[in-house]
Each structure stands twice: as structure tokens, then as C-alpha cells.
Amino acid sequence: MLDDQFHEIRRIETMGLVNTDDHDSVLEADGSRWLTAYEPDPDTGPVDSVVQHVTADGVVDFEWSSAAHADETMAPGDADYAHLNSIDVQPNGDVLVSFRHLSSVFLIASRAHDGHESGDVIWKLGGRDSSFRFP
């Protein structure tokens, strides 16, 4: 975070991850934060996109990775197969996430509800495996 003179006054980073990304973040009134990261996967090689919710006390409350969706990329062979661009926290806590190289937007459950577990992709708009069909 920068002050009005562009001096760093606070650094907000993901917990336990290597590469906090600056594409997008959401700072909540309760002091918690939704952050994004690009994390190298030592097992597979590509760089996974990660969404993380950290409480005001610095506890990871939620974490989701794109690793399970690597085969949906529109950029085969690119280590940055997902390329997360933006996040938006919905009123019920679900997270809307936009991915450049998946050519899609995912709605991800951050808590169990309505038959979905935390981390489930509720729906996908666009991409190789869209939940929606357009005439």
C-alpha cells in the first residue's frame, strides 16, 4: 500500500505462497483480504493461479488453485496456462474469477452451500468446458 506521496506504508502478501500477484485484490472492512498469486508447480512445471482469503489475523481462511483446470487452457505449452486477471467477491462470499488463458470466468464457492463444497467451481462462463450454451 502506498501513501499519497507513493511511499510504501504497508505490504500485503499471500501467506505461505511464493509469488503474490498484483493483478487484483480485495481489502475487506473487517481487515481480511482476498489476494491472488502465481505459484510454480514443482510436480507439473506450469504456474498455477491461486486465490487466497487471509483473515485480519493472518490466517488463511480459503485457498483455491487452478491446477485441476490446466487441461482447459487455450494457451497449450504456456507455463502461465491460466493467467488470472481479476477477482470479485460476491455478497454470499463466492468468488468470481476471470482467467485470460482459460478464456473463461469461474464462480467458485468459498464456503459449503447449496450442495457445493468450499473450492467447488459452481459454474464456468466460456472456455473449453462452459456451463452455458449460447445460440
Image (cartoon, rainbow, N blue to C red):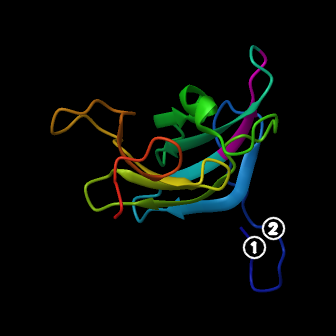
For the stretch drawn in magenta, the main secondary structure is strand
Q: Residue 84: where, in percent of width, then height? A: 64, 51
Residue situated in front as seen by the camera: 66 or 51 = 66
Q: Which residues are magenta?
A: 37-42
Residue 85, relative to residue 71: is it above or below?
Answer: below
**In contact (CB < 8 Å): disc 2 and disc 1:** yes
Residue 32 visible within the image? no
Residue in view at x 72 percent, y 40 percent: 81
Residue 128, relative to residue 60: is it above or below?
Answer: below
Q: Residue furthest left?
A: 114
Give left or right: position of 125 versus 21: left
Q: Amino acid at mark 2?
A: Glu
Q: Amino acid at mark 1?
A: Leu
Residue linked to disc 2: 8
Give left or right: position of 50 versus 111: right
Residue situated in front as seen by the camera: 104 or 39 = 104
Q: Residue 64: where, in percent of width, then height? A: 51, 35
